[in-house]
Amino acid sequence: MKELTAEELKQIQLNILKHVAEFCDVNGIKYFLCGGTLLGAIRHKGFIPWDDDIDIAMPRKDYVRFFELYDNTNGRYRADSLENNPDWHLSVGRVGDLNTVLYDHVLKEKYANYHAFIDIFPVDGVPNNSVKHKILLYCQKLLSTLANASSFSYSASNHFSDSKEVNINLKNNIRTCIKYILITLCFPFSTKKIQRLVNFIAQLTSISESNMVGLTTYVWNWKFEVLKKESIDKFVLVPFEDSEFYAPIGYDEYLSSTYGDYITPPPKASQVSHHNFKVYWK
């Protein structure tokens, strides 16, 4: 098999995004760019140059509907989530290109194989009460840590490699030591059951009863990616590579709360991808 170049991988991911966006538009499903993809759209008008993934999010109702309807709309792409695949091992969904094979050496063998993909995150309510918010945050972080440790192989961590942190090598080494200990302790746990619990807990707070919403199946740097509920009532088109895709109307608030000064890129030495997979043409 021939390994994809970085540019080939980005083009495949962009093509998946275009197909997903078109499907959502036709079927009245809300989606928006999130995480580093939204950051790349605003700061670079496309991919972050040293990054190689695409993330989008959907309000929970739209997320469920998407994974109910999307498969069989195109023979090249497949959608997987806990909602439509009983063997799925993540709390978030993905759409993969079946013409490719991905191998992630961070994961155990049974989870390591997939395809070039884009991630799709469900958006749920965030508790208005600050104490309940923290309880949810720490609960999801603990469960996600257990799930990751039960699915990871013994490989070095490079979590901080593309950040603005100081002492990056030291922090990555400390994280690697902690990771190895957790992998050893969590070996007997069921990754799938833990991720189902993460997904269930995220849905306990509905969007309708919340002032803030966010990606509560996923904890990044000990916080949720959150934004005001009104921000997902309206969307704006933003340029990304050769196309335009939707961003929440409150994208500045979202990016600022997630990344701080998101306009200033990290130092040159930190402009590296933190992913650990290789992708090949089938």
Image (cartoon, rainbow, N blue to C red):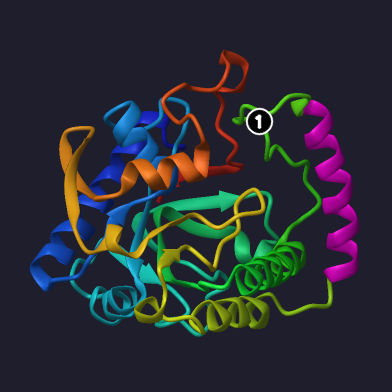
Q: Which residue is mark 1?
A: 161
Residue 57 sits in which quadrant?
bottom left
Say whether residue 20 is visible: yes
Residue occupying image coordinates x 67% and y 57%: 107
Q: Pick whichever, 23 or 253, lies toward us.
A: 253
* Above or below, comparing residue 223 to residue 270 in the picture: below
Q: Pick whichever, 103 or 145, lies toward us.
A: 145
Residue occupying image coordinates x 55% and y 32%: 273
The answer to if 146 sits in the magenta stretch is no
Percent of width and height locating residue 261: 48, 29
* Above or below, comparing residue 125 to residue 83 in the picture: above
* 240 on left or right of 131: left
* Above or below, comparing residue 14 to residue 224 in the picture: above
The answer to if 172 sits in the magenta stretch is yes
What's the magenta bit mostly, secondary-structure-wise? helix
Q: Which residues are magenta?
A: 169-186
Say whether residue 9 is visible: no
* 213 on left or right of 224: left
Residue occupying image coordinates x 42% and y 82%: 83
